[in-house]
Image (tube, rainbow, N blue to C red):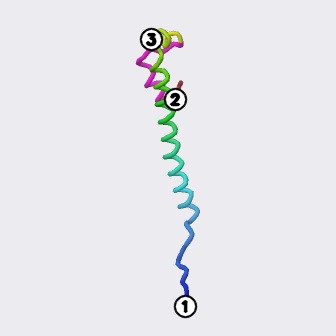
Amino acid sequence: MVAIDNTRALSPRLTYTIVTYVTDILLSFHKARQTRETVRQLSRLTDRELNDIGLSRGDVLHLARAGQL
């Protein structure tokens, strides 16, 4: 019996594109998790504690999303 090998390797460009796409997705999930954790921790602080570090309650989500915390 003769076996025919019809498998082909992915082109380097396609491989790079797929790896980049998956990496971007994973980084997005990681950033979203970090943002949620930052917001969760800062939400536990009182208004006075937030004021002591120069933040207001309204700043928390905006700054966490911008990655400035």
Q: Earlier in the sequence, mark 1 or mark 2?
A: 1
Figure check: 9 above or below 65:
below
Amino acid under disc 3: Asp
What kind of element bears circle 3?
Answer: helix
Figure check: 49 above or below 59:
above
What kind of element bears circle 1?
Answer: loop
Which picture quadrant has residue 16? bottom right
Q: Residues within 10 Å of mark 2 (few under 14, many from 20)?
A: few
The residue under label 1 is: 1
Which-is-in-front pick, marks 3 and 2?
3
Q: CA distance from mark 1 to mark 2?
A: 61 Å
Left or right: residue 8 compared with residue 58: right
The residue under label 2 is: 67
Amino acid under disc 1: Met
Which-is-in-front pick, marks 1 and 2?
1
- Residue sitting nearer the eye, 44 or 10: 44
Asked whether 64 falls inside the magenta stretch, the response is: yes
Residue interval drawn in magenta: 53-65
Q: Earlier in the sequence, mark 3 or mark 2?
A: 3
Position of the N terminus, as image quadrant, is bottom right
